[in-house]
Image: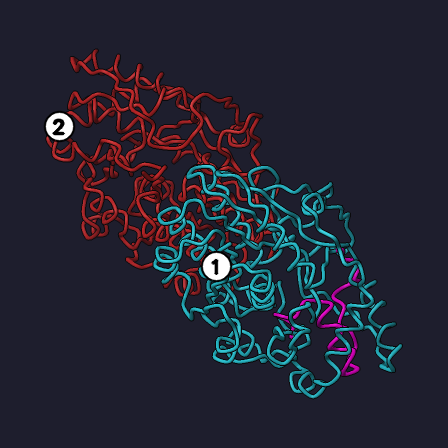
Chain colours: A cyan, B red
Amino acid sequence: MKVLICGIDGYLGWPLALHLDKLGHEVVGMDAGWRRIWVQSVLGQSIIPIRSWKVRQDHTRFSMIHAELLHKIDSILQFYKPDAIVHLAEQPSAPFSMIDSKNAELTQHNNVIGTLAMLFAINKHCRHTHLLKIGTMGEYGTPDCVIPEAGPHEFPRQPGSFYHVSKVCDSVNIEFACRSWGLRSTDVMQGVVYGTRTDEIMEDPKNNATRFDVDECFGTVINRFCAQAVIKMPLTVYGTGQQIRGFLPLKDSIQCLTIALENPPNEGEYRVFNQFEEVYSIRSLAAIIELNARNIGLDVETQFLDNPRVEADSHKYSPRHQKLFDLGYKPTNNLRQEIEDILTDLLPHKKRIESIRLALFPKTRWRAK
Amino acid sequence: MKVLICGIDGYLGWPLALHLDKLGHEVVGMDAGWRRIWVQSVLGQSIIPIRSWKVRQDHTRFSMIHAELLHKIDSILQFYKPDAIVHLAEQPSAPFSMIDSKNAELTQHNNVIGTLAMLFAINKHCRHTHLLKIGTMGEYGTPDCVIPEAGPHEFPRQPGSFYHVSKVCDSVNIEFACRSWGLRSTDVMQGVVYGTRTDEIMEDPKNNATRFDVDECFGTVINRFCAQAVIKMPLTVYGTGQQIRGFLPLKDSIQCLTIALENPPNEGEYRVFNQFEEVYSIRSLAAIIELNARNIGLDVETQFLDNPRVEADSHKYSPRHQKLFDLGYKPTNNLRQEIEDILTDLLPHKKRIESIRLALFPKTRWRAK
């Protein structure tokens, strides 16, 4: 299968490319390099060192195009006509989108208008192409009912940041394009991804490692807690920590995306997958990571901070997530082992975490002033 | 009340400004002038001649700022701090958004990012300000159930064009801003507006007339049918004409917006009004206009064209629209009189319609090739 991965330089894009390449798929990647710059702009860095764009390109069989999606997607699709596109080329951070109007506008312009340009390019050049789009479980918010695996044309949306709004807008655009133009798409409402390892990364960790962010913007919660544990900084729980979310390890995300690619939707079909393994409360995750850390001699505590976000503290959370299981998803189901692996992989880079210590603390507040 | 009208140069903005000014409210207007240019770009023109920006400004008591919303809203709100903003500064045409990717991107950038910038500016400078935002009944699509007066956090959205998608995105952003920041907003899901007259326009038709578009992009259906009748061009019904929509005359739209302004929502409240008077099928409107035209000696027929849009032909349509009635909306309830007035007002401008005859015919197709 010919697969174009937009956002190949990111946390998911890179290991997905390695995995699809290994499976024998014909991979082409594209990235404008913004993620590296955005993380620097919030004084973060990938804790696990990653190769430069050039070295990545030199070490791989597949091509990597350094280009802005909005400007180049039309000519790339005209030339390449892939069987599938994995669209990961979005600004992926909720706090980053809440810093100021500039960042909110950047996020919605990059994400919404970028996806819109992609839909037009698909419709023009390769109407058969399967668009695998990565959204977020955060589109649904935390309504007081069972959350189905359903698009915004079937089930309401209550996003929790301007980033989350951008994902809803993407979904609305994509559903419309499938309904009106007969395009085909899988819209993945993904849970929070964590972890450092996939089989391909472990084959050559130095060259194949994927980025691992832990700052308040780009670091997701389990990854950030593990980094905090390594430098014995208290685990920063927002509010009471009773917030519940769906989670999955990096290798499961790669597995699920591969399953979606290998089981494409029909012409004109817009389908939604809720992609996560298990749900946890934030405070229970903090407790698990505290325990794991203590087992390897890292004595850490949990600090409950005023919640900088506006979100429900205590809420029902029971989203369905059956469709990927039906297609063969086998969850690895080993949170504790994953956390142990993360801690092991981070320990050699303690100084890199310490050097961005301030960036781990929440500064971005949802409610101004 | 201090009211900022963004989009004061448009079909609704101008008569609303005249009306609010007459009621004694302190009006300031803002417009970048795009509507005049967009209409020209599709080879249309306002059939009823309207005054230039400069003459409008010279003839009114209120100030009119010629500025791009996205760039100037922050400084205008910092200075002006209105009690209410009426946001009409959007690209308002579904077909215009469907012409090509450039137009779709222009529409979503102008509408979504413009509204986003406005939300940030309100939050920064005047958190008490009531944002009265004009959306469209088209956000809901035509689901097979009763449509409530509800936001995208409560009821699904099935928009029918990239323009309609932009309105959904606006609603999602505004609902989020009210929920997170405590802003207050009325999000008006408006039906199709038609008509040439309001009391203020009739006081000085030459200076006070509002624009009246009839091209396939910016002309709404009743207005376009009346123009077609005047030049004895067949009324162009798309598909079977069994599509049902909600409609209201221009003067009712102005009445409803005034009611919304004079009855603002509470702090943190996001409320949705479905704003229309009655529902009609497109074919029944064609029949009514045929009859009205014949009464004044205009012999016209209806032509059923292949529907250029992708939309349900035959569908249930029962949206609620109670909230404005509860606040005192008194529908004028006189479709036939309105149509007679439109025909009367258009007859002197027969040549202006003939000169853009081709622009009345649908060329923009939803499904490419």
* Residue type marked 2: Lys
**Label 1 Cα neighbours within 10 Å, binned few <14 / some 14-19 / many ≥20:** many
Can see residue A44?
no
B85 is higher (above) or lower (below) than A230 = above
- Considering only vertical position in the picture, is A156 above or below B268? above
1 or 2: mark nearer the eye: 1
For label 1, the residue is A4
Q: Position of residue A97 (x, y in %)?
A: 55, 64
Number of other residues with Cα within 10 Å of mark 2, as a class: few under 14, some 14 to 19, many 20 or more: some
Give the SS element for disc 2.
helix
The chain ID associated with circle 1 is A
Residue at the spot x=38%, y=44% of the render?
Answer: B24
Instruction: Point out the stretch of residues depicted in magenta.
Output: A215-244
Q: Which residue is mark 2?
A: B350
**Residue toward you, B332 or A77:** A77
Provide residue B190's location: percent of width, then percent of height.
Answer: 44, 35
